[in-house]
């Protein structure tokens, strides 16, 4: 359980965080979404005891931040934007070293490495030096390294930035497995809208302020319309058809906003004869951001 | 802390190029010596023993004592690349989020710089002893070996704390690379290896002798060359001349710096920069 109350952070004149309040439930998948410079990394660095706050209160599992930093560090594992592994050490050495920081016995750490490498499928790279790993493999080990001390909370700070789409998907498959196995709290910061689809709770942050929060599903329902795109058989009828359907014509297609995707069925069956083709697109988190800020989401 | 030190040392030693570059100045000085600096030396030994094993014992003792001082400076400096890189790439943040004392984390780099220097300069020392036997048939007496080992510890301690302090004032690893290049280029000169110090005016000698490399080199020569000097020179006046010309004894203006004085000065350098470093460590370890 993480509880953040009116958290602010100033860098001289610049207010990086303007008093944000949120809480994260134990065992949930929590996402902090926003463009670059929104204050995501600042928030994460404060929660992980790396940065001091200007004002506000933070409690992590009942422990007050700044008073109990040592206790808090034992409860969290963090994956930074940049990999922090040692190139010159093997995967196993990297993980063993991390275990030593927490005063864990070697046998305990080895057992943990065994479990993690099974879940995350990296047994075959254990004895390789990190510098020989691909970007995706490396990221997996970064996550494993953060999990060595069996943290209650895993913090992922833009973990997939710079990875190709395939590797990103692979990492998420692995993360889903880890969450299922451990039931730990995951706090993700990202500027990839599609990564928060499964989140239990999404906080959208922009310019140091929270502009919306809810489950990803509800945010889309509330702030993003599903759209039906229709191409008419006869282009000359586009304006009349568009009026009849309650949409607008854009470059030879009619855009019809829908309250629910199933509403498309009614419209399509009623106008079956005049429609050449159609497409139903679910509202995306990009639309949520656009609707909330009036700006396109540019990461 | 020992886990951290082991990690720092491994990431340095396994990086073959980093180690090579730490020794680059040593290799360059060695090459220069073989190509032409050796001639200066040969001209300076008494004619009667030129070209004999005794003569070579003196010459090689001079060059080897200088080389191990250079190694004890350039290795800690080269090692500190690990520190600046970790700070630059946020690898240090990863240590900071672990339940470890921040002061210990930063201190571990300083200690590792010292240990890396001790390890590699001791290996260099052993290498010079082997070369000495192969080239001249002579071996340093036990007392000199013990003195040299003690001086290497002191030398590494001093250079590690000086360079650690300087490195904490740098922000990027490229700044550190530039510093390493600068020191690597100057050190042979500052330790009086490229050009024997006696070639300069007394004024310029005094300036050079204020700096730690020459002071350390002087101390090291006194220990390393003691046996060879006794063997080669019988005439007091000529040995005094040799010692001043080749920087075995150094002076600031008319003040001759004795061995004891030099040890005190070097220890003060080490202590001063160690204290300054502790201040830097506190700043590093404090949350921003």
Image (spheres, rainbow, N blue to C red):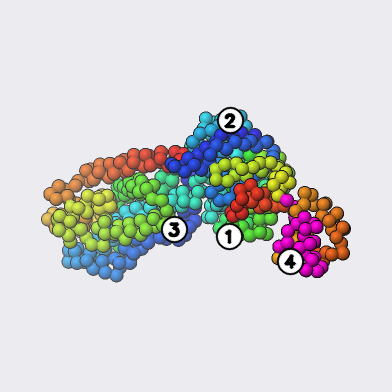
Distance from label 2 to label 3 (Cα)? Answer: 43 Å
The residue pinned by badge 4 equals A252
| Of pointers 4 and 2, the one earlier in the residue sequence | 2
Viewer-nearest of discs 2 and 3 = 2
Instruction: Tell me, yes or no, if residue B128 can be seen here.
Output: no
Q: Please give the chain letter of the residue carrying mark 1.
A: A
Looking at the image, is A70 positioned above or below residue B81? Answer: above
CA gap, disc 3 to disc 1? 18 Å
Tags 3 and 1 both on a single chain: no
Labels 2, 1: one chain = yes
Image-based side of B243 in relation to A117, left or right: left
Which residue bears the numbered disc 1? A132
What residue lies at 66% left-to-right and 59% top-to-bottom?
Answer: A165
User: Looking at the image, is mark 4 or mark 2 nearer the viewer?
Assistant: 4
Q: Which residues are magenta?
A: A225-250
The nearer-to-camera label among 1 and 4 is: 4
Residue under label 2, please give it.
A63
Q: CA distance from mark 4 to mark 2?
A: 59 Å
- SS for dot 4: loop
Q: Nearer the viewer, mark 2 or mark 1?
A: 2
């Amino acid at each position: 359980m993480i509880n953040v109350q009116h958290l602010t952070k100033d860098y001289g004149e610049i207010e990086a965080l303007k008093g944000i309040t949120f809480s994260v439930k134990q065992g949930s998948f929590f996402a902090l979404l926003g463009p670059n410079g929104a204050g995501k990394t600042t928030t994460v660095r404060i929660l992980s005891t790396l940065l001091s706050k200007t004002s506000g209160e933070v409690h992590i599992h009942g422990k007050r931040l700044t008073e109990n930093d040592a206790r808090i560090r034992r409860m969290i594992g963090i994956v930074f934007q940049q990999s922090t592994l040692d190139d010159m050490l093997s995967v196993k050495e990297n993980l063993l070293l991390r275990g030593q920081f927490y005063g864990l016995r070697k046998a305990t750490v080895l057992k943990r490495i065994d479990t993690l490498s099974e879940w995350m499928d990296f047994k075959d790279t254990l004895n390789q030096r990190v510098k020989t790993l691909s970007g995706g493999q490396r990221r997996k080990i970064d996550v494993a390294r953060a999990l060595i001390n069996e943290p209650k909370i895993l913090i992922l700070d833009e973990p997939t930035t710079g990875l190709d789409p395939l590797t990103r998907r692979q990492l998420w498959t692995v993360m889903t497995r880890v969450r299922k196995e451990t039931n730990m709290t995951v706090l993700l910061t990202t500027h990839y809208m599609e990564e928060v689809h499964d989140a239990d709770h999404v906080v959208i942050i922009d310019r140091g302020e929270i502009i919306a929060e809810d489950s990803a599903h509800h945010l889309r329902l509330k702030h993003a319309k599903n759209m039906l795109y229709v191409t008419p058989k006869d282009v000359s009828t586009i304006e009349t058809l568009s009026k009849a359907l309650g949409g607008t014509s854009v470059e030879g297609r009619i855009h019809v906003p829908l309250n629910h995707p199933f509403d498309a069925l009614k419209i399509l069956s009623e106008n079956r004869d005049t429609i050449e083709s159609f497409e139903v697109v679910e509202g995306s988190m990009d639309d949520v951001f656009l609707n909330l800020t009036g700006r396109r989401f540019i990461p | 802390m020992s886990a951290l030190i082991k990690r720092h040392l491994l990431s340095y030693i396994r990086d073959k190029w980093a180690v090579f570059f730490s020794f680059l100045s040593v290799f360059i000085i060695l090459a220069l010596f073989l190509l032409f600096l050796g001639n200066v030396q040969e001209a300076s030994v008494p004619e009667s023993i030129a070209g004999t094993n005794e003569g070579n014992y003196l010459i090689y003792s001079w060059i080897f004592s200088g080389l191990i001082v250079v190694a004890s400076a350039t290795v800690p400096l080269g090692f500190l690349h690990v520190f600046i890189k970790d700070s630059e790439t946020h690898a240090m943040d990863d240590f900071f989020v672990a339940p470890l004392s921040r002061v210990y984390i930063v201190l571990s780099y300083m200690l590792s710089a010292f240990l890396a220097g001790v390890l590699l300069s001791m290996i260099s020392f052993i290498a010079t002893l082997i070369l000495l036997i192969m080239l001249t048939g002579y071996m340093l007496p036990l007392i000199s070996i013990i003195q040299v080992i003690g001086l290497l510890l002191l030398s590494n301690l001093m250079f590690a704390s000086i360079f650690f302090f300087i490195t904490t004032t740098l922000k990027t690893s490229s700044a550190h690379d530039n510093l390493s290049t600068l020191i690597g280029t100057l050190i042979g000169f500052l330790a009086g290896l490229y050009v024997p110090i006696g070639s300069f005016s007394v004024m310029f000698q005094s300036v050079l002798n204020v700096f730690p490399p020459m002071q350390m080199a002087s101390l090291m020569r006194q220990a390393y060359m003691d046996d060879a000097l006794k063997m080669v020179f019988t005439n007091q006046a000529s040995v005094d001349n040799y010692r001043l010309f080749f920087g075995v004894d150094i002076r600031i203006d008319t003040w001759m710096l004795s061995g004891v004085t030099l040890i005190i000065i070097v220890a003060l350098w080490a202590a001063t920069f160690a204290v300054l470093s502790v201040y830097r460590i506190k700043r590093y370890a404090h949350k921003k």
